[in-house]
């Protein structure tokens, strides 16, 4: 039976949608202006991104479970519980406009991103599903306070499987906003490229 944490993380992803569009808007634009006007392209990118969240959730859940296996389980469990809840409080501040509330987590992820970001260039401009999917897998590791706050819950999940499922719930919450943004941008790009629109604008 799934508990309320899964629904809560789904809502975090859904209600934090404007942040997601802001963070990933560049890659959505790169997909669109690279010729990605099909649902399949945007869906492939987003599935790759969510797959990275699931992998990160599994790693966080496994790490948390391993720490609980050490001596002195109660202090370790308490620390993980407090950390997860502090991250959720910071997320609340972030969503109401205190933009620096999660900035420290994004700085922490910069080292990994500096190694991964150059790899994205080989898939740009993305013109096929086979390019969009690995691009999404890489962009799923973009430093993001919203993602890291969800990962804090995965860290205290108690197992790799539960951590992965928690991040899946979060990722599915982010899907509507980013998928819709991509499709709307593609439609707009198609509209402005029409000859009659270009002539009228001129």
Image (cartoon, rainbow, N blue to C red):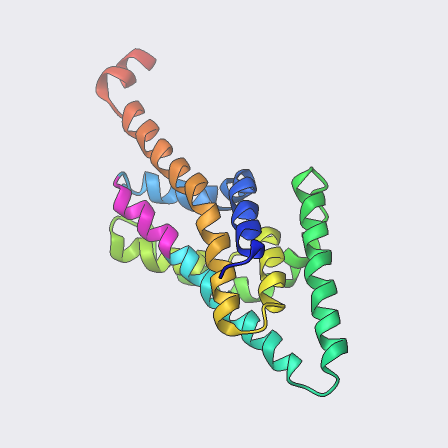
Task: Pinpoint residue 77: horizontal percent, then vertical percent.
Answer: 70, 73
- Asked whether 120 falls inside the magenta stretch, the response is no
| Quadrant where the image shows the C terminus | top left
Residue at horizontal 63%, vertical 68%?
156
Left or right placement of residue 6 versus residue 185 in this view:
right
Residue at horizontal 39%, vertical 55%?
136
The part of the chain drawn in magenta is 38-47
Task: Pinpoint residue 157: horizontal percent, then vertical percent.
Answer: 59, 68
Q: Does residue 74 appear in the picture of this structure? A: yes
Left or right placement of residue 17 versus residue 152 in this view:
left
Task: Pinpoint residue 155: horizontal percent, then vertical percent.
Answer: 61, 68
Could you tell me what secondary structure mostly forms the magenta stretch?
A: helix
Q: Does residue 141 appear in the picture of this structure? A: no
Residue situated in front as seen by the camera: 49 or 199: 49
Most extreme residue toward the top is 200
Left or right placement of residue 31 versus residue 55 in this view:
left
Residue situated in front as seen by the camera: 154 or 196: 154
Task: Pinpoint residue 72: horizontal percent, then vertical percent.
Answer: 75, 84
């Amino acid at each position: 039976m799934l508990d309320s944490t899964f629904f809560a993380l789904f809502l975090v992803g859904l209600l934090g949608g404007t942040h997601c569009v802001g963070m990933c808007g560049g890659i959505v634009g790169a997909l669109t202006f690279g010729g990605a006007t099909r649902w399949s392209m945007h869906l492939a990118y987003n599935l790759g991104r969510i797959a990275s969240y699931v992998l990160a959730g599994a790693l966080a859940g496994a790490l948390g479970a391993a720490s609980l296996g050490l001596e002195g389980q109660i202090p370790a469990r308490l620390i993980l519980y407090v950390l997860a809840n502090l991250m959720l409080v910071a997320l609340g501040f972030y969503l109401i406009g205190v933009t620096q509330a999660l900035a420290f987590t994004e700085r922490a992820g910069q080292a990994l991103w500096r190694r991964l970001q150059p790899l994205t260039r080989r898939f740009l401009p993305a013109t096929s599903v086979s390019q969009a999917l690995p691009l999404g897998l890489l962009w799923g590791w973009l430093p993001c306070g919203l993602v890291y706050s969800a990962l804090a819950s995965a860290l205290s999940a108690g197992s790799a499987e539960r951590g992965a499922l928690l991040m899946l719930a979060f990722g599915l919450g982010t899907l509507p906003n980013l998928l819709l943004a991509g499709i709307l941008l593609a439609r707009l790009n198609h509209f402005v490229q029409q000859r009659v629109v270009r002539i009228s604008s001129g």
